Amino acid sequence: MNIIKLSDSVINQIAAGEVVERPASVVKELLENAIDAGASRIELTTAAGGKSLIRIRDNGKGIRQQELKLAVLRHCTSKLTDDLLDIKTLGFRGEALPSIGSIARLKISSRTALSETGWEIVVDNGSLIEPAPSPVNQGTIVEVSDIFIKTPARLKFLKSDRAEASAITDIFKRMALAFPHIHFSASGSDRSSLDYPAGNLITRIGQVLGSEFIDNALKIESEREGIELTGLVGLPTYNRGNALHQYFFVNGRPVRDKQLLGAVRGAYSDFLPYGRHPVLSLFIDLPPNEVDVNVHPAKADVRFRDASLVRGLIVGSIKRAILDAGHRSSTEGGTKMAAAFRPGRPQSRNANHSASDFDKNFSAQWNQFSPQSNNGNLNDYHTNSSFEEASFAPSGQTEIVDGETPSLNSHPLGAARAQLHKNYIVSQTENGLVIVDQHAAHERIVYEAFKKAFDKQLPSQILLIPEIIDLPEEDVDRLVAASDDFSKLGLKLEKFGQGAVAVRETPALLGEVDTKKLVLDLVDELAEWGNSNGLSDRLEYVAATMACHGSVRSGRILKADEMNALLRQMEVTPNSGQCNHGRPTWVELDLKDIERLFGR
Ligand code: ADP
Ligand code: MG
């Protein structure tokens, strides 16, 4: 066996395997170079998702003629520093250009301020073409065409043009957010054009995430042990179907890191269900020796020295901001009318005694929880099955409540006046009217009740006939492993032979519930989260899932005292301004606004 040294072109190709995963990674490297060159204007052009063309033009300091050849040589960099912990530039490895040149045709045209003419150099899939004069303005144009054309195996792994184009857009947006004082634009046959003139951070966030986001975002500004967290986080009601609209920056670099995504998920866990994700832009600044942002050249992972401190700061700051915002919920889709309907005012006047009221109310609810006691309490939803027939209003649609109940008007959520479309409670308050989504409101109340009782034993309802549910063995194991937690919440189940569980009792709070559906949802929950989460985290998800099952369905006709009971319960329930799915549970219209609507 002979040991030989690999040729430069092979070494470059191996490096390219790490640096250049897909067109978006090329874009990331080239944008970084343009930023490092001090550009104030950067233009990106792509075609076919970057597969056939990526071109980046900047007005930075340019590359001198005699250095063009060095720029495309491996481990050649102008950004050298002896202290890898103290890197002020985005690049420092001197790896990007040679790697890109080894797997595509790379053309660099550049001119410095002092040079009479520009020069260009080409590296075509590893072979260098000598520099030649080129008529360009000051700055640099880097053109990468036909990526992976000589390595069809890697070309095959790329996704559709559309998917690659959107990965490029994602990187572009992250970079643009990190450097708001640079004018960024993007265009090409594979995309709709983007143009972000230079501005400050807030204007840039507005350009990238939309001005609606700014209207629906909360400001974060906190600090703990030298770690600073700033940025804007969206209200829970302003949510999305994926986590792509979450932007993180560590010491000014865009990163996309599992721990950070996880911390955000934790922060919003009380306010958002599965499948919905907040929108945010968060900047973490910390001493360089507290973090390693260069774990891998292509990956955006970071390594924090004290990861739990960072997590705690993120979770704590976001939760506090949301709680401080109280009942403010999304203004999205606001017309003049909808704008007049405000999500209710914060319940500050209740704030100092709400916890104890909640406790009282809560235990009262339990004490009354028996099929015999039907006194207009919220429990009637579950225990009195006859009220549905009994309370049909003449129209079959609307329960109208006659007469004045002035004492109730003074409650924040007022006195129930009518139920519309079997789901909306209209109530009269001192200064206007409130409309409540009864399904959403009840879901929130049940969820908070569950959470409140995590450290107690919640009552259960014994099923006359245990429900046997067939499941894959691994799901059975998961359920059984979590059965102690479930039991606390009132759900009692046990293994029932091979591949089945028997459910014997269900949480009383849920009333009648589709047991099988509930258990299957819980299984999904457990499978997704595994055992990695702490008990309390997991309980919250379990509670949210359960609450969803037990909620008063829309379509239930309620009597006046039932409606009022629901309103009173909402007033003492924390975070009752929105349901677990982040939708508002009630909106308020002020008398002044009503008058304004009618032009009075
Ligand atoms: P690194 O960025 O790690 O130094 P690269 O391979 O990305 O390595 O770039 C090599 C060198 O080429 C850089 O150090 C820089 O001097 C020069 N360079 C690359 N792109 C530009 C640009 N757009 N403007 C000016 N100089 C550039
Ligand atoms: Mg670079």
Image (cartoon, helix red, strand yellow):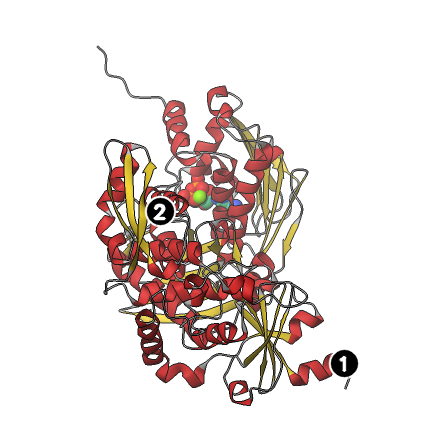
The residue under label 1 is which amino acid type? Phe
**Dot label at residue 322:** none
State the SS at label 1.
loop
For discs 2 and 1, the disc positioned in front in the rendered view: 2
Residue 419 makes an appearance in the image: yes
Residue 442, percent across and down?
A: 46, 65
> Badge 1 is on which residue?
598
How crowded pointer 1 is (Cα within 10 Å; few <14, some 14-19, many 20+) is rated as: few
Q: Which three-letter amino acid code belongs to the residue tagged 2?
A: Leu
- Residue 481 in the image: x percent, y percent? 22, 44
Q: Are marks 2 and 1 in contact (CB under 8 Å)?
A: no
Q: Position of residue 503 (x, y in %)?
A: 30, 45
At x 57%, y 31%, the residue is 160
Q: What element does badge 2 sit on?
A: helix
Residue 27 horizontal side relative to residue 190, left or right: left
Q: Which residue is mark 2?
A: 522
- Labels 2 and 1: the sequence-earlier one: 2
498 lies left or right of 342: left
Residue 348 or 210: which is nearer the viewer?
348
Q: Nearer the viewer, residue 383 or 110?
A: 383
Who is closer to the viewer here, 72 or 316?
316
Up the image or down, 356 lies above or below 373; here it is below
In this picture, is 378 found above or below 3?
below
Image quarter of the C terminus: bottom right
Residue drawn at x 29%, y 21% is: 5
Residue at disc 2, CB closer than 8 Å to ligand 2: no
State whether residue 48 is above or below residue 585. above
User: What residue is drawn where x is 27% and y is 56%?
Assistant: 307
Residue 51, given in percent of the width and then of the height, sits at 57, 31
